[in-house]
Amino acid sequence: MSQVASRSILMLALIATFGAATVQPATGAVGLAEWEMKTPGGHRISHVDPLKARFGTCLRSADANPADPADVHVDHLEWWVFYRDHVVGKARSGYFIFNEPRGHVDYYPTAEGLSAQLTARNLGAPISVRLTPEDGWRQEWIPHYRDACDRLKAAGAPPAGVDAATYRRMQDLCSNLGSE
């Protein structure tokens, strides 16, 4: 079993053992692959059912119905950066600049074209680092994992049904999580 798969299983065990009922992802149903991130301008970057099957990680209107594809502005995001009033990034359709107040997106076929437009539009410095879908997942779920680890530490003993070896691995995982 890979280290990533092993860690995922232990994280699931932590969540299940210490309060899965308190974990509520963006759509309200427990789904560890789902998450949402608010943009500074009030839109959402979403990786939720039912959108992810068709649109992958997408940029959509904040108050949109997740089942309505008309409110998806950019689909299959690879990375993005927040600027004042804009989301800039790369998606399957190319590089893009999304004007949040206007709800308008422009695409560019090359990174050079995007860079030229950033300069021409005088957007200034970004207000975030470059983010990826993994960052969105981490933003949504790492706090829940940290809470589960805090409860594990406070309990001071293996939860019912957890053997000593698994408990040690859970503790190790929590230690590693604290260093991220």
Image (cartoon, rainbow, N blue to C red):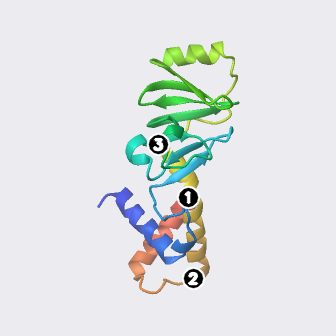
> 5 or 52: which is nearer to us?
52
* Mark with earlier residue (3, 1): 3
Determine which quarter of the picture holds residue 39.
top right
Q: Which mark is residue 37?
A: none
Which residue type carries mark 3? Thr
Q: Which residue is mark 1?
A: 142
Badge 3: residue crowd in 10 Å (few <14, some 14–19, many ≥20): many
Q: CA distance from mark 3 to mark 2?
A: 39 Å
Residue 42 position (above or below residue 176) = above
Front label number (3 vs 2): 3
Determine which quarter of the picture holds residue 40.
top right
Q: Which residue is mark 2?
A: 156
The image position of residue 178, as x and y in percent, is 58, 61
Front label number (1 vs 2): 1
The image position of residue 22, as x and y in percent, is 58, 71
Q: Which residue is mark 3?
A: 57
Which residue type carries mark 1? Ile
Which element is circle 2 on?
Answer: loop
> 56 or 72: which is nearer to us?
72
Residue at x 44% of width, y 72% of height: 13
The image position of residue 97, as x and y in percent, is 57, 25
**Decide: marks 3, 1 in contact (CB < 8 A)?**
no
